[in-house]
Image (cartoon, rainbow, N blue to C red):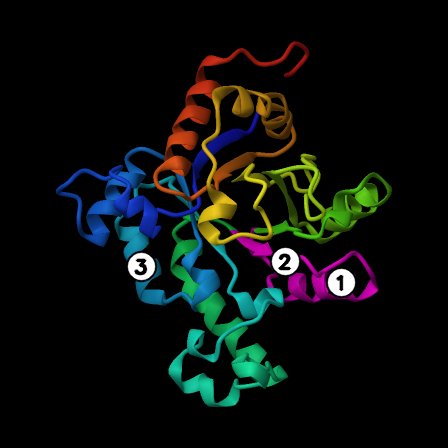
Amino acid sequence: MGEILVGACSWTDRELLAGGWYPAGCRSAEDRLRYYTGRFPLVEVDATYYAMPSTRNSHLWVERSPVGFRFDVKAFSLLTGHPTRPGALPAELRTAAVGRYGRTTASPELLDEVWRRFAGALEPLRSAGRLGAVLFQFPPWLAPDAAAVAALRACRERTAGWPVAVEFRHPDWWQPGQRESTAGLLKELELSAVAVDTAQSLPTSVPPVAPVTSARLAVVRFHGRNRAWGTGTKEERFRHRYTPEELSSWLPAVHAMADRAREVHVLFNNCCGDAAVRAAATMRHLLDTTDRPAGAR
């Protein structure tokens, strides 16, 4: 059975810092990371989606975390096809990046340089064994078609040798008629599928399936079940506190994933106040104290 690691999708989220989870004297970046890593074995770094990561920060994260701790790092927005502000790029790259409406237009040369710098910034984590996965969360307009398949293949070529997890926001990737083809493509490319828990019965709802497409890693991300998902503000979209019953419903799937992958990462993205870290603690308790389903290995 694979190891199941549970954590939150940020340790520096503004609402978490204001939510009272950290002790009063835990004020510095170093103190907060050490406090977090003393309670969870895994975290997702979401800041790298909004701005390029730095080698310096990667070195600091290695120094301030224990052996065996994992950082899942979210890919920079330009690399996943999302709109990107030129200001999110290093200063020396911005003049070549301004396109229409103040968004970045990525020439092949600029894209090559961004990929090079992104990979270099993560190298300290990778070489220290702390890089759990690089998460490519693709935009909701990336539907399953020939162009999307080509984009996935190009992404894999760029990330050869990296542990990569893929989350689709377009629901058609995991609908019954497409599901087998999607899983087959990810297996071929040795990319880990990301299962999601989110509000259902919405046009943008991704089905709560839990495919395992890599023997190395399987991932589940819990986004909360607020029906403002996809339409409201960030706080509205992610405002949800998971009940033990809601989390328990995922236990059979998580255990089944652990039967097929060496590691399973269970991450909570309902980052509103301390909801994510509280849900992560509850899930760890449930996994530690609940018997596995009959018939599971």
Q: What residue lies at 55% left-to-right and 35% top-to-bottom? A: 264
Question: SS for tag 2?
Answer: loop
| Amino acid type at image mark 1 | Ala
| Amino acid type at image mark 3 | His
Question: SS for tag 1?
Answer: helix
Q: Which residue is mark 2?
A: 138
- Answer whether residue 140 is magenta in the image: yes
- Answer whether residue 12 is magenta in the image: no
Q: Which residue is mark 3?
A: 59
Q: CA distance from mark 1 to mark 3?
A: 34 Å
Tell me the quarter of the picture where residue 65 sits.
top left
Q: Which residue is mark 1?
A: 148
Is residue 12 in view? Answer: no
Sequence-wise, which precedes: disc 2 or disc 3? 3
How many numbered marks does the figure carry? 3
Quadrant for the N terminus in the image: top right
Left or right of residue 128: residue 170: right
Q: Position of residue 178 (x, y in %)?
A: 83, 45
| Mark 1 touches mark 2? (CB < 8 Å) | yes
Q: CA distance from mark 1 to mark 2?
A: 10 Å
